[in-house]
Amino acid sequence: ARVASDAAALLAFKAKADPSNRLAFFPAANDSSDDHCRWPGVGCSGDGRVVRLVLEAAGLHGAFASGTLDRLNQLRVLSLKANSLAGPIPDLSRLLNLKALFLGRNRFGGSFPASVLSLHRLRTLDLSNNHLSGPIPPALAALDRLYVIRLESNRFSGSIPPFNQSSLKNFNVSYNNFSGAVPVTATLSSFDASAFSGNPWLCGEVVRKECGSHFLFFHRGGGGGGGSSSSSNGSGNGSRIAPPPANTLRGKHEEILLPGSASPSQKMHKRAVVAIGFLAGSLLVIGIFGVSLVMQKRRRKMKQGEILSPVKHNNNNNNGGADASPEPNVESYNQEIESGNNELIAAAALAMSEEKVKKLAKSGCLVFCAGEAQVYSLEQLMKASAEMLGRGSVGTTYKAVLDERLIVTVKRLDAAKLGATGKEAFERHMDMVGRLRHPNLVPLRAYFQAKEERLLVYDYQPNGSLHSLIHGSRSTRPKPLHWTSCLKIAEDVAQGLAYVHQASRLVHGNIKSSNVLLGSEFEACLADNCLSFLVEPSESQDSSGYRAPETRKSNDQLTTRSDIYAFGVLLLELLTGKPPLQQPLLMATDLPAWVRSTREDGADDERLMMIIDIAAACVQLSPDSRPTTWQVLKMIQEVKEADTGDNDSDSASLS
Ligand SMILES: Nc1ncnc2c1ncn2[C@@H]1O[C@H](COP(=O)(O)OP(=O)(O)OP(=O)(O)O)[C@@H](O)[C@H]1O
């Protein structure tokens, strides 16, 4: 009966976690059968009990429902790494034999799973690269067999518990929002500072940063007339930015407040956020329904396996530039469907003949990045229903729907636009870029190269680009962003960029608003990461407004400091709603007045002034005068801190 119950637990898990039916789990013919031990990823003991379940990069994109795998009380190893499972992590307290739990690289949200604290045999805990938030329970420090704790790239906050297990050898809490002094224990002191990096508010001996003296980045010339000087709380050296005056917002009804950004009039905005969320949700449902209707219609027209010739996209964006962005958002689908214009959706499978696909498959293979399993083949990818999203500086970008469920973005690089990057150099570079994994970066999942063809496969980001959000698109009107939403987006982008610069020592090279995409939770994610390496200098002029003066002639001069310049221009675009080429050339001292003149809200707010200061520092003409990415991130978080200081109840919604 226990064996049958293990099979039922696996099937119950699959029912919720695997809506696309990727797992080959089939109900057994009779109850006593141990067929489930032969299901992929399942390992059993001699008596047919499941002891191991490893479903890594298996394309699971549903939920990890409670009352499913937690029934496998003989489980030793559970790995659901590198899927897209969302929602909270369920109660696992019945898995008393569990030794290794790998849930990294998913989309789990909610708080730290407290049930883990009762798993006394646990040696490996990997919750990295999710959207988990809130504090880490101090009782985790009492699990004395832990050998690995990986919590990096989440949104955990609060203090680091005093871990001192002598067994603990692999520890990483980087890129979270932890704060305060790191406890000086023998175990924690043995880890490199990189295990704690990306938590600007951590201090103490272990991270070699003095606690107490809160460094202020905003030094305004003495006197501070016109409301532009930083105020202090009067506590001498440990000065902090004083809470801003209340009621400084105007025109809030016309502003967008993104989920996760805070506002002084939080109650009202919370309602607005719920309404936007509801609206977005409804649109999504309608959109998916609409798209599937059109897809069905299209499939009926197609003979099986046939690859259509390309249809003309009626909104090609040949310059990849600022206007007429063909955003693939739900609203535009709805409009197209309503207007009966199915052409946009009924585009061809990556515009290639079947013969060519076959030839390509023989001459190269799809390389999956970061050690992830091959979840689809080149043929499957090329046969996917595809829609062109636009043309940029390196090629054409498509949205491809595989097996009717898995949506990816495929960038088909245009040989004519690329420099003479050799096969091996391309591979080496893409391997490096493919290893980048951070919640604020669009991950490169796979790449392909054959003689005359190079393809890059990314996750599809469902909520359009920052460019469309700020300037509007074919189907949406431009709307001013509430400045706290600007702050949230700026922080997200800076987090992603800091990771690129610090973790990989790469340069992004093409920061601009159409390369900032909004993820499923409206988090901002940098796209087209580190591709400038491949482009001839003359081919990347479309983003000239973002280019630092020293890089305008050659891509050789692209550095982390030129990324910072582009970030500063992006920040000004966020704050003013003006694309770079419409931004006047102003001295740093004139910028605040100009930015304030473009805004209706918070014109006198000290925190808005601080953000303008950051932008002004980033767009300095001399690269050496610009701050480092790390400093920029710290400055943004300092503004955020000033904000949360004013609104304790808001801090939970900031991520
Ligand atoms: N992963 C993705 N998910 C959703 N939309 C995407 C994705 N990648 C790109 N897009 C959108 O597709 C369109 C075309 O992108 P593409 O990168 O080809 O051009 P670009 O961003 O305008 O220019 P560049 O090549 O200089 O980055 C843009 O509107 C972009 O926002």
Image: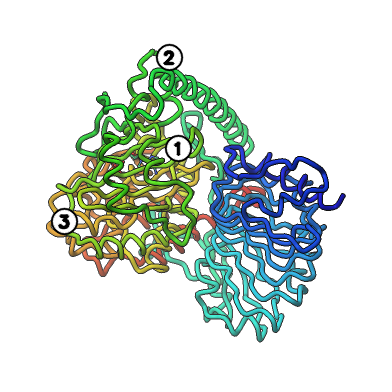
Closer mark to the observer between disc 2 and disc 3: 3
Mark 2 vs mark 3: which is more N-terminal?
2
Can you tell which mark lies on residue 338? 2
Left or right: 402 as drawn, with respect to 456: right
Quarter assignment of residue 123: bottom right
Mark 2 vs mark 1: which is more N-terminal?
2
Q: CA distance from mark 2 to mark 1?
A: 24 Å
Q: Provide the residue designation for mark 1.
A: 402
Quarter assignment of residue 53: bottom right
Q: CA distance from mark 3 to mark 1?
A: 31 Å
Looking at the picture, how far across and down is residue 459, in whole percent? 44, 46
Q: Provide the residue designation for mark 3.
A: 419
**Which amino acid, mark 1?**
Leu
Residue that appears at 66% across and 79% down: 168
Closer to us: 633 or 506: 506
Closer to us: 492 or 422: 422
Which quadrant of the picture is home to ligand 1?
top left
Label 1: how many Cα within 10 Å (few below 14, some 14–19, many 20+): some
